[in-house]
Image: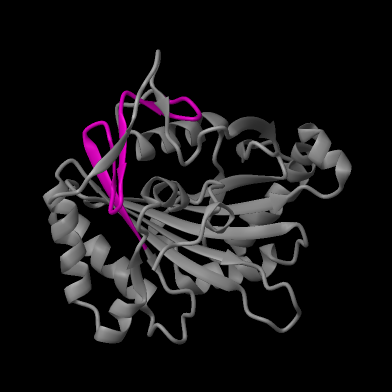
Amino acid sequence: MGILFGRRKASGDGVEHPAVAGMRMEGERDARGFRMGVVLPAHAGEATFGVRLSDASSLSAEGVARWRTEVHTEPSVVATCATQRVAGHDSTAVLWATVAAAGKAERKDTSELLTRLAVFAPTVYEAADMAGMDAKPVTRDELAGCISAELVGEDATAVFPPRAAKISEGRAMVAVGDQVTATFEIGDDRDEDEGTYGEVVALATQLSEEYDGELSVRLADWARPAERTGARDRRVGLVSLTAHDTDVVEDSTRAILVNLTAKQRLAVRRVWNRQAMAAGASLGAGVLGWQRLEVAA
């Protein structure tokens, strides 16, 4: 395919995946007694945690909208994300909330922020329950295992940040070990893009089932709460296609695009030159693409 990769050399126990390099993970017990994992960026100005749905099929656009209506009432929430991972006929779904540190004390002392998250966490999964999506917090060990498996590979050691022997990033995809991933952005205006995100979700899910797990798909529906009353949340979708064979990824890309209308295709853009970051962002676990660099058109 002529795709050129820039290689990141490993040293010792490998190289950190660039999407989450420098980030850290903490564990906390919430106000209901559930253990939860929390991802923090290097600057510790915010924190992200997730709640996993007991039944991935219960994830719906209507349910997510109801969930966000409740969660976004917390002023310190800077982003929420609904993610789904599909591999063949297996599917998992997680709802994520990213919360900004409130005041100097929380920015200076992570334990202060974690204490507030422990109180807030039940609001996130209880809102999911009320929206028809039974959910409970993702633990620290589960979170480390999930991120390692998704970014580095199923056989990767569950550490955070995850490490790989070799990571090669090109303009159009990122190769980690023996798997390659290509990530696409889907337009942020659901009225204008004719429901493109929902259509891509359906097509990508169908393709993964047809490939019988040879192709895994990550789908992320991001929302940033409106800064002014009466305004709409800012939305963006991401889809990551992962396989051991580059041709499987590219063939799947073409299969998705050819089944979209001309107008819908305009809303789907490859994340050129930022594939490692985009692969992390499609996890929902605290990699906020708009804080890194804008997606290239």
- 182 and 30: which one is in front? 182
Question: Residue 8 lies in what quarter of the image?
Answer: top left
- 127 and 269: which one is in front? 269
Confirm whether the magenta stretch covers residue 245: no
Give the left or right position of residue 254, taking residue 153 as reference. Answer: left
Q: Position of residue 197 (x, y in %)?
A: 38, 72
Tell me if residue 142 can be seen: yes
In the image, the segment drawn in magenta is 158-184
Q: Position of residue 267 (x, y in %)?
A: 36, 76
User: Which quadrant holds the C terminus?
Assistant: bottom left
Q: Position of residue 144 (x, y in %)?
A: 49, 32
Tell me if residue 212 can be seen: no
| Number of numbered discs on residues | 0
Residue name at image x 77 percent, y 47 percent: 101
Residue name at image x 65 percent, y 55 percent: 124
Relative to 1, residue 113 above or below: above
Confirm whether the magenta stretch covers residue 159: yes
Q: Position of residue 42 (x, y in %)?
A: 64, 36
- 180 and 148: which one is in front? 180
Relative to 76, residue 20 above or below: above
Question: Residue 84 lies in what quarter of the image?
Answer: bottom left
- 175 and 54: which one is in front? 175
Residue name at image x 32 percent, y 79 percent: 266
Which scheme is used to colour this image of the protein?
A: one colour
Residue name at image x 23 percent, y 38 percent: 179
Residue extending farthest to the top is 12
